[in-house]
């Protein structure tokens, strides 16, 4: 998810507090006066209480609709009882007693403000300079779109095969709740949802009676209707850019834009560089449901964990009221959210919502091209499924952007629309009056390819129980009969560990079952549930149980369950074969290839941890365990039946794919050794902490010294910054001044940042002999990882002119250096404003 948020405001604890707000200034709430929310208990209470306050302006969160069908739904659901209170300071004290008692009021809340950093749009990309995309090649592409060969991420979700089954129906509408989509984009225009009544109606009139005026392409909170969002447009392109039209990119469910392909409804609830109220976001969910959308695509979330009641109610409204138009393909709405880019297992609002139907709600994590959880993706039990989200190694997600352009982005924001697109294909394939969001969610999860094995050795591997969405498997016909019975079921005991083995059966569509359930004795509750979706039918499969509770007298049985819940008969494995004395190596991962990243910085290694793999070694007596490999960075330790393989890579470790083998033999009997051949791929390092780098470890961009008490400066900050992966970054147009109290004796500073240029007016007239001001600069990159840097303005009467503090000049050789010793490969005439070391001398470059 490429958008970062912060939220402000505290919930009003009870109705008594409203008395303070209504009889005193609005500043008592810490927010603007119009940000007070009230939800009434019923319509009669709302009408009577509002009538008691003629001096207070009440605005319904959901506008009144003259269309009676829509307005009836609002009233039946109770969503019409939410109000924004404006100008409460004008209320009379005597009227506030009603609120103090709380009669007729279900709750009083402050609006949660969500801050979205500015995104730096890129209108022109030299695609020839992008990182290679591995082994993905298409000799005969399924689509003629020129950038389709760069969309490696569609191969990962088995999309070409899925297109043979479904390409999207025109009556399936996906509400992209994000920045306002560039609906004029040549790859999106044909698939935009259009409100025909407004398009053909009168300007400034609510022609369709839905409560909104001139809402031709959807609902937009932006005050600038001509602002189009790069982020929202990118997300929309993954869902439903037009396929096979000879231009740009392909999408998951875009079809040909004529008689196939789903529609995109733009819900502009996110505008980069602004604060958005939660009630405006809530309005977007209600609008989407009322106007025909059945899938809500959300690549955003709050930066806080406190829930928003109005937002939760609106999400519930969408889930229950979407699909009520006569031609709707599904009854009810499915809400799909990006899990977030915080490398955390802590769900934020609204992903932590407790008051809406979780069976109609999904959270999507991101994986890399190597099928490993990305360095930024959130994880945990609350994440339902994974999709390609790109990675900061150049394997990014290609899609549309503003001004008719195309762009690479990374984030769970990019993973989420893959799942929304697959959901739209499922709705298209199985559309009916009986189709439910629960069916669609189950199809996505139960047909997803298990990912645990690819996380082997990484931190949080047990919490990353994600399946990779499989578009092809999700679109097979509903299974009408039970899957085959697992064959060759056997159970072996190795000391206290048990190894369950069987052959993967097929369901009625020829696919592997979703899961296999193992039972002990006559129990009705499974001993273990093993994900097998994505496995190869007919392949040998193993599950290693380390619980230590195996009973060698128990009869174990196994059954297969397909994605539609059909169960096979059970296969029996009477008793357990005692293999305690057998010399063997067990690989619990069901894969033989592992991926390891080189470390790039201490923060990186602390976050991902040292990569280790544990293999179970069984056999009597003393054993010798060795690694056969020419690579010195692969280490091996043996402790209490575990062979621990450690990849001790460094920045100098070679990149590539390498074989290695675990060798085990009884002490003194190497001729009777057993072997486990494996391979590993060493990839270049990731970087996800600081979006950009600068020339100093203490993160000072530049320091200007002056003996002039007043003056002005203009510094192009972007020229001082580079991104480690060449990604785009934005310098936030807000800054703060920090002071070192031991040095600062007085100054006046006026400054601002416009288009990455810091403009400073300084006045040290009140200073004595020395004073220093430090301006903080905040930066965010396209992964929404933030960095902070500083610019020092230093005054001293002892300085000569305007220059900088520099280290001993002896460390510099001929050429141009920054004041912190970084050599620059440019000519003096091309240098921006600043202080440099040029041929061992300090030089101030000061151009008008």
Image (cartoon, helix red, strand yellow):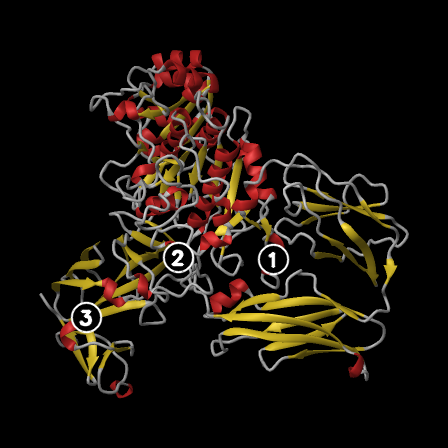
Determine whether the residue tagged by mark 1 lies in a helix, strand or loop: helix
Look at the image and tell me whether residue 102 can be seen: no
Compare marks 2 and 3 and give the one earlier in the sequence: 2
Residue on which disc 3 sits: 834
Residue 107 placement (x, y as % from top left): 46, 25
Left of 275 or right of it: where is 637?
right
Residue occupying image coordinates x 30% and y 20%: 208
Residue at position x 34%, y 31% in the image = 35
Q: In this view, does 141 lie to the left or right of 584?
A: left
Q: Is mark 2 on a helix, strand or loop?
A: helix
The residue to which callout 2 is attached is 149
The answer to which quarter of the image holds residue 192 is top left
Residue 620: image quadrant is bottom right
Q: In this view, does 840 lie above or below 819?
A: below
- Residue 653 position (above or below residue 97): below
Q: Mark 1 points at which residue?
A: 461
């Amino acid at each position: 998810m490429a958008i970062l948020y912060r939220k402000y405001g505290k919930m009003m604890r009870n109705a008594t507090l409203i008395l303070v707000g209504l009889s005193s200034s609005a500043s008592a709430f810490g927010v603007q006066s119009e940000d007070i929310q009230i939800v009434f208990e019923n319509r009669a209470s709302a009408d009577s209480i509002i009538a008691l306050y003629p001096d207070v302006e009440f605005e319904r969160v959901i506008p009144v609709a003259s269309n009676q069908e829509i307005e009836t739904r609002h009233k039946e659901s109770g969503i019409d009882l939410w109000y924004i209170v404006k100008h409460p300071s004008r209320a009379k004290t005597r009227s506030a007693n009603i609120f103090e008692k709380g009669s007729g009021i279900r709750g009083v809340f402050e609006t949660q403000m969500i801050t979205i950093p500015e995104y730096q749009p890129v209108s022109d990309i030299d695609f020839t300079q992008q990182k290679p995309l591995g082994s993905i090649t298409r000799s005969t592409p399924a689509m003629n779109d020129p950038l389709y060969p760069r969309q490696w991420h569609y191969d990962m979700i088995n999309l070409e095969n899925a297109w043979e089954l479904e390409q999207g129906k025109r009556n399936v509408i996906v509400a992209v709740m994000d920045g306002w989509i560039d609906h004029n984009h040549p790859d999106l225009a044909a698939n935009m949802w259009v409100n025909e009544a407004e398009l053909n109606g009168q300007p400034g009139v609510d022609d369709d009676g839905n409560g909104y005026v001139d809402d031709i392409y959807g609902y937009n909170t932006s005050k600038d209707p001509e602002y189009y969002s790069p982020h929202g447009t990118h997300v929309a392109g993954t869902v439903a850019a037009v396929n096979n039209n000879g231009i740009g990119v392909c999408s998951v469910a875009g079809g040909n834009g004529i008689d196939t392909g789903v529609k995109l409804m733009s819900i502009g609830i996110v505008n980069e560089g602004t604060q958005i109220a939660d009630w405006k976001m809530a309005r977007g969910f209600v609008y989407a449901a009322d106007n025909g959308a059945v899938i809500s695509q959300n690549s955003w979330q709050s930066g806080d964990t406190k829930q928003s009641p109005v937002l939760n109610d609106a999400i519930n409204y969408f889930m229950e009221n979407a699909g009520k138009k006569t031609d709707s393909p599904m009854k009810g709405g499915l809400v799909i959210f990006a899990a977030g880019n915080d490398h955390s297992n802590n769900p934020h609002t609204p992903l932590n919502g407790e008051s809406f139907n979780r069976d109609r709600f999904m959270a999507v994590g991101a994986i890399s091209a190597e099928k490993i959880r990305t360095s930024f993706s959130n994880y945990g039990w609350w994440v339902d499924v994974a999709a390609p989200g790109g990675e900061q190694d150049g394997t990014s997600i290609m899609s549309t952007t503003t001004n008719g352009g195309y762009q690479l982005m990374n984030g769970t924001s990019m993973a989420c629309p893959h799942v929304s697109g697959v959901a739209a294909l499922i709705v298209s394939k199985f559309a009916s009056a009986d189709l439910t969001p629960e069916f669609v969610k189950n199809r996505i999860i139960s047909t997803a390819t298990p990912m645990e094995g690819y996380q082997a050795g990484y931190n949080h591997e047990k919490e990353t129980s994600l399946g990779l969405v499989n578009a092809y498997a999700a679109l097979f016909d509903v299974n009408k009969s039970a899957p085959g019975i697992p064959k060759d079921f056997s159970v072996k005991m190795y000391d206290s560990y048990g190894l369950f083995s069987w052959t993967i059966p097929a369901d009625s569509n020829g696919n592997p079952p979703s899961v296999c359930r193992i039972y002990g004795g006559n129990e009705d509750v499974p001993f273990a549930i093993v994900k097998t979706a994505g496995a190869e039918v007919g392949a040998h499969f193993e599950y290693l149980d380390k619980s230590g509770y195996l009973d060698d007298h128990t009869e174990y049985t196994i059954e297969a369950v397909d994605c539609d819940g059909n169960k096979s008969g059970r296969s029996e494995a009477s008793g357990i074969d005692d293999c305690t004395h057998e010399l063997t190596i067990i690989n619990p991962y069901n894969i033989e290839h592992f991926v390891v990243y080189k470390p790039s910085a201490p923060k990186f290694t602390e976050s991902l941890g040292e990569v280790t793999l544990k293999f179970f070694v069984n056999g009597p007596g003393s054993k010798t365990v060795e690694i056969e490999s020419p690579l010195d960075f692969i280490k091996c330790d043996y402790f209490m039946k575990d062979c621990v393989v450690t990849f001790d890579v460094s920045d100098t470790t070679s990149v590539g794919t390498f074989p290695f083998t675990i060798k085990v033999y009884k002490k003194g009997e190497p001729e009777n050794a057993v072997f486990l051949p494996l391979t590993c791929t060493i990839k270049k390092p990731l970087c996800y902490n600081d979006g950009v780098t600068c020339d100093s470890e203490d993160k000072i961009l530049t320091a200007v010294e002056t003996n002039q008490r007043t003056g002005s400066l203009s510094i192009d900050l972007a020229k001082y910054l580079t991104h480690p992966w060449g990604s785009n970054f934005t310098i936030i147009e807000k800054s703060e001044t920090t002071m070192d109290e031991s040095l600062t004796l007085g100054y006046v500073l006026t400054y601002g940042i416009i288009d990455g240029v810091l403009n400073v007016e300084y006045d040290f007239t009140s200073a004595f002999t020395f004073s220093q001001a430090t301006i903080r600069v905040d930066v965010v990159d396209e992964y929404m990882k933030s960095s902070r840097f500083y610019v020092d303005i230093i005054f001293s009467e002892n300085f000569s002119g305007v220059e900088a503090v520099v280290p001993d000049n002896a460390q510099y050789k001929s050429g141009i250096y920054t004041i912190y010793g970084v050599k620059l490969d440019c000519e003096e005439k091309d240098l921006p404003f600043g202080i440099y070391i040029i041929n061992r001398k300090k030089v101030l470059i000061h151009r008008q």
